[in-house]
Image: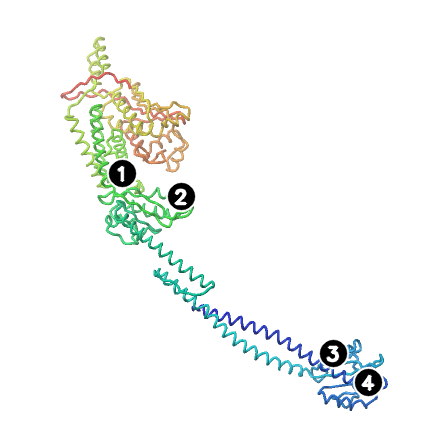
Amino acid sequence: MRIGLGLRLFAWFLVVSLASAGLIVVLGDRTVRAQASAQVGDRLTYEVTMLGQMTASALFGPIDPSDTALGASVKSLADAVHTNLSLLTADGTVVADSDLSDLTGLPKQFERPEIKGALASGTGQAVQNDGRGMRMYVAQTIVRDGIVLGIARASVPLSDVDSIAASVRGQMMLGSALGGAAAVFLAALVSLSILRPIRQLADGAKRVGEGHLDHRVVLSRNDQLGDLALTLNEMAGRLQTMVSRLDRRNRDMRIVLDTVAQGLVTVAKDGSLGDERSKAIDTWFGSPKAGVKIWDVFRDAHPNVRISLEIGIGQVFENTLPLALTLSQLPRRIEDGRVVYELAYEAVDAAAGTAPTSILVIVSDITARVHAERSEAEQREQMSIFAAVAKDRSGLIDFLRETGKLIAFVGEHFASDVRRVEVLRALHTIKGNSSLLGMTSVSWLCHSIETRLAEDGGTGSMRRADSEALESAWVALTRRAEELLGNVSSATIDVTAVDVAELVSAIQRDESREGLMRTLARWSMEPVAKRFTRLAEQGRQLAARIGKPGITVETRAEGVRLPSDRFAVFWTALSHVLRNALDHGIESPSQRIAAGKPEFGHLVLAASDSNGQVVIEVTDDGRGIDWPRLREMAVGLGLASSSERDLTDALFADGVSTRDEVSELSGRGVGLGAVRAACQQLDGHIVVESAIGMGTTMRFVFPAPGAPPPAPTRKVTVSVAPRANV
């Protein structure tokens, strides 16, 4: 129930007034009774004095206890003053009493307090019950010539004192009633005098709060309420000025928001959009209503991106992690249908250590920029194809042929759960080799597919749309490459000057026909030096891209040749080892200098053919493999880790990566798995030697291939090139 201020003021004034009146009555009652008692005491004292003087004049000595002549005079005086009077001897014997005619048997009164007081000081006073009720007694000694002749005593009932006090109390109550009535009147008057201007102030404040900023309170008072009215009027004037400025600024801001190319909108803790937003938001997303969740605004975006946005905004407002970290984890680019949006985020009212009140989301339509970037990427890619044709035509042909097989494999088995790991290996290999040659349209597409699969929890399979997009990108790439390559159907055999010299030497030694046939048959196999040269050049380019320029690559092929078709899958997978050595192993120049190493890293590609085995080695002088960390990862994945062989197997297991972050080059944990699968396909095995801070050697051992069967007759082009020195 609401109680008004006027009623409260009136009640408080009334309570104070009545409390004051009550206190006055209580204190006055005590004073009245005391004054009434004093008044009766004075009267009794006067009367006993009269009785004593009258008795002393009639006596010639102390009062005789047997003298009864005094009774009449005592009775006469008592009737005149309406008081009980009595005379007593010095030892307390009652000789005469105005109320008693028979004094026989009365005890002596010397123990009574008024008698003791009279004998001690001349006058004694007491209040006590003598059988007739409570009475007030005053006793006084009768003295002449210093001799106590007797004691005169007077008494009245206490009711006489009460009647006097009651009379005075009645007068006081009447005065109190009149004072209370006056207090009620004054309380009402004062309350109204205070309430009226307060009501004016309240009404003025209400009208100002409702937006009537031109309203002013008229209150002619030279007190605090008048000062409050002046302050309220000044405040309303300042508010009117401020609101006018804000209106102008809002109009200017609205002009800016309606013309700015970016979409600006605030997002609350629950992800709902605020009322204020730029015109671009309404244009792009069909004027979403306030309260709509921001992840619902991007209707056609990938579900995982929307979920990431929902979870990420919740983490921002939970304030359990650093604000900069949670904001950085929110999605930065969203493809909503055919439109690509770039998102930026700013915390609103985020004091140190506190959660923001809202988030300002800045949306930019970067579709045109993305298309331009893709166009530029296609041009750069075309230049890369042109450079590959000019520099290593056969290498480009091998890349197209081997990668085309992987593309076909992915297209055939993209939805297979049984061959899922093989598909991921092939996808990662396509990405890596395409990136090495600058074929960004394919490498970035593979990277985005891998990223989406990782966002799906790492257990999902490729979608048909992924496979079709990859195939489409590959067809476009190969079409552009074929325009530069021309006819690639004829086979080419690479013969170096050293090969020719060895053949001439064999003829001069009169080598047998079978020996010469074996030598010539080996020419149909691919020189490992050719692969090494290609890998070395790709390695130097990759090192420069990742901020490790100046790396030297040493090749030692020793004339080893291998069947190109049979070993194509291995050479394709070996690029993963090269990338890992450059990205994981070899340190940056500053890190190498700090570790006391030469500024630039060193990579060795070696091949040997002896004792019925072919050995391919990749050696780097980098940081080495962190075996203890690898053992922890193996244990976490449930892999064997008790021996060196176990750890080597774990290193090449799918899903194991010693890199903390995923990049275009590495971090997926499937590249080395593809290498192991290629080795197993060739009946080979892997040996790893590594020491912390010293480097790593990965040795791939295969059975030496036998002489190839005679090839069918066909047109062959022989290309004789000088020996390559890398």
Disc 4: which residue: 56
- Image depth: mark 3 or mark 1 in front: 3
Earlier residue among tags 2 and 1: 2
Disc 2: which residue: 322
Q: Residue 387: give x, y in percent of width and height.
A: 22, 26
> Residue 586 occupies which quadrant of the picture?
top left
- Image depth: mark 1 or mark 4 in front: 4
Earlier residue among tags 3 and 1: 3
Say which amino acid is labelled 3: Gln
Q: CA distance from mark 2 to mark 1?
A: 28 Å
Say which amino acid is labelled 2: Pro
Query: Is residue 305 visible in this depiction of the protein?
Result: yes
Q: Residue 658: give x, y in percent of width and height.
A: 36, 33
Whether pointer 3 and pointer 1 mark residues with C-beta atoms closer than 8 Å, the reply is: no
Earlier residue among tags 1 and 4: 4
Classify mark 3: helix, strand or loop: strand
Between 625 and 222, the one lying in front of the other is 222
How many residues crowd around disc 4 within 10 Å: few (fewer than 14), some, or many (20 or more)?
some
Q: CA distance from mark 3 to mark 2?
A: 92 Å
Earlier residue among tags 4 and 3: 4
Say which amino acid is labelled 4: Ala
Classify mark 2: helix, strand or loop: loop
Q: CA distance from mark 3 to mark 1?
A: 118 Å
Disc 3: which residue: 125
> Residue 457 occupies which quadrant of the picture?
top left
Q: CA distance from mark 1 to mark 4?
A: 138 Å
Disc 1: which residue: 448
- Image depth: mark 2 or mark 1 in front: 2
